[in-house]
Image (cartoon, helix red, strand yellow):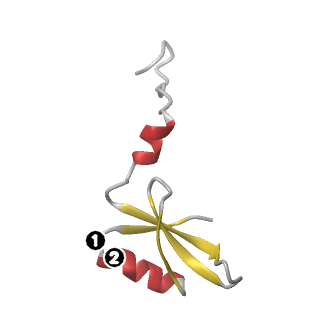
Amino acid sequence: MENENNVVMFTPLAEEAFLSLGAEHIAYVKEVSLPDGAHAVGIFSADGKPMASAPSIEIAQALIRQHELEPALVH
């Protein structure tokens, strides 16, 4: 939708709609701390649910691709 100045106006997404973007195609990776204090790389679904962990980003990305998903790094 455009306003009178030909500027494109976006409608805000509901949180649920925003979280579902990429849900079927993307898994997110970020550093996590395990209960024993060790560090790992967590793998999360697009809606933030934990799926797995790996010892490195490279292994996490390989695991994600093995399941036909695209990895995305979260800072």
Q: SS of the residue at dot 2? A: helix
Q: SS of the residue at dot 1? A: loop
Can you say whether 16 is above or below 1 in the image?
below
Residue 35 tag number? none
- Which residue is the extreme one toward the left? 68
On the rendered image, what quadrant is the C terminus found in? Answer: bottom right
**Residue at horizontal 30 percent and vertical 79 percent from the top:** 66
Given the image, on which type of amino acid does mark 1 rest?
A: Glu
Residue 65 tag number? 2
* Residue 45 at x, y percent in the picture: 43, 61
Q: Relative to the observer, which residue lies in front, 37 or 72?
A: 37
* Residue 35 at x, y percent in the picture: 66, 78
On the rendered image, what quadrant is the N terminus found in? Answer: top left
**Does 74 sit left or right of 45 as displayed?**
right
Q: Relative to the observer, which residue lies in front, 55 or 37?
A: 37
**Residue at horizontal 38 percent and vertical 74 percent from the top:** 64
Q: Kindly indicate the quadrant of the structure image that contains residue 62.
A: bottom left
- Which residue is the extreme one toward the front? 35
**Residue at horizontal 48 percent and vertical 59 percent from the top:** 49
Gap in Å between the C-alphas at discs 1 and 2?
Answer: 5 Å
Dot 1 surroundings within 10 Å: few (below 14), some, or many (20 or more)? few
* Residue 57 at x, y percent in the picture: 52, 81
Residue 68 tag number? 1
Given the image, on which type of amino acid does mark 2 rest?
A: Arg
Dot 2 surroundings within 10 Å: few (below 14), some, or many (20 or more)? some
Q: Are marks 1 and 2 in contact (CB under 8 Å)?
A: yes
**Residue at horizontal 34 percent and vertical 76 percent from the top:** 65
Q: Relative to the observer, which residue lies in front, 33 or 56?
A: 33
Q: Relative to the observer, which residue lies in front, 27 or 51?
A: 51
- Which residue is the extreme one toward the top? 4
